[in-house]
């Protein structure tokens, strides 16, 4: 059983490394090309806000002991207005409820450029 796992792991690593090994080298721009500011790529911008669990309690203040004013469910659209410490002031666009949620459960999706 262990040798099978090792073989599968080696095959997966080989499959992941193959595109990198076959990638062509990037070419430089011609010397006569005018220098312009680099365009902002979508992968360099922060991602959308997401919920990392099924539901998050929306609080009236920045404390886990404060009064609950609603629940933000995964799939609801929401806007983050400001941040204070480890808390984000949000508006749940689905229900219209405004309040604070912990950054333990609500965070920006991470994007990265692969070139």
Image: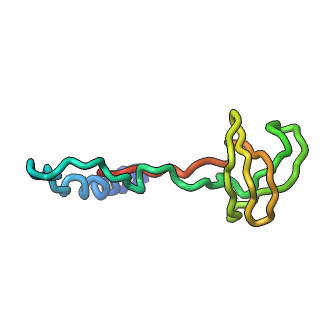
Decide: is 7 above or below 95: above
Residue 80 point in image, percent of width and height: 67, 50
Q: Residue at x 24, y 53 (%)?
A: 20
The answer to whether 32 appears left or right of 111 in the picture is left
Camera-side residue: 53 or 58?
58
Residue 42 point in image, percent of width and height: 42, 56
The answer to whether 48 appears left or right of 52 in the picture is left
Q: Residue at x 73, y 46 (%)?
A: 89
The answer to whether 11 appears left or right of 79 in the picture is left
Camera-side residue: 14 or 22?
22
Q: How is the image coloured?
A: rainbow
**Name of the residue lying farthest toward the top:** 85
Residue 1 point in image, percent of width and height: 43, 53
Q: How many marks?
A: 0
Would you identify the image quadrant in which residue 104 lies? top right
Camera-side residue: 37 or 14?
37
**Name of the residue lying farthest toward the right:** 67
Q: Residue at x 69, y 33 (%)?
A: 85
Q: Residue at x 16, y 56 (%)?
A: 24
Camera-side residue: 34 or 21?
34
Residue 14 point in image, percent of width and height: 28, 54
């Amino acid at each position: 059983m262990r040798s099978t796992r090792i073989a599968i792991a080696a095959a997966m690593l080989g499959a992941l490394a193959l595109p990198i090994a076959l990638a062509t080298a990037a070419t430089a721009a011609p010397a006569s090309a005018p220098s312009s500011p680099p365009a902002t790529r979508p992968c360099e911008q922060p991602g959308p806000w997401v919920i990392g669990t099924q539901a998050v309690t929306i609080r009236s203040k920045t404390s886990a002991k404060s009064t609950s004013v609603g629940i933000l469910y995964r799939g609801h659209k929401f806007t983050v207005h400001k941040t204070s410490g480890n808390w984000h002031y949000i508006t749940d666009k689905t229900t219209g409820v405004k309040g604070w949620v912990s950054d333990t459960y609500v965070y920006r999706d991470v994007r990265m450029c692969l070139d």
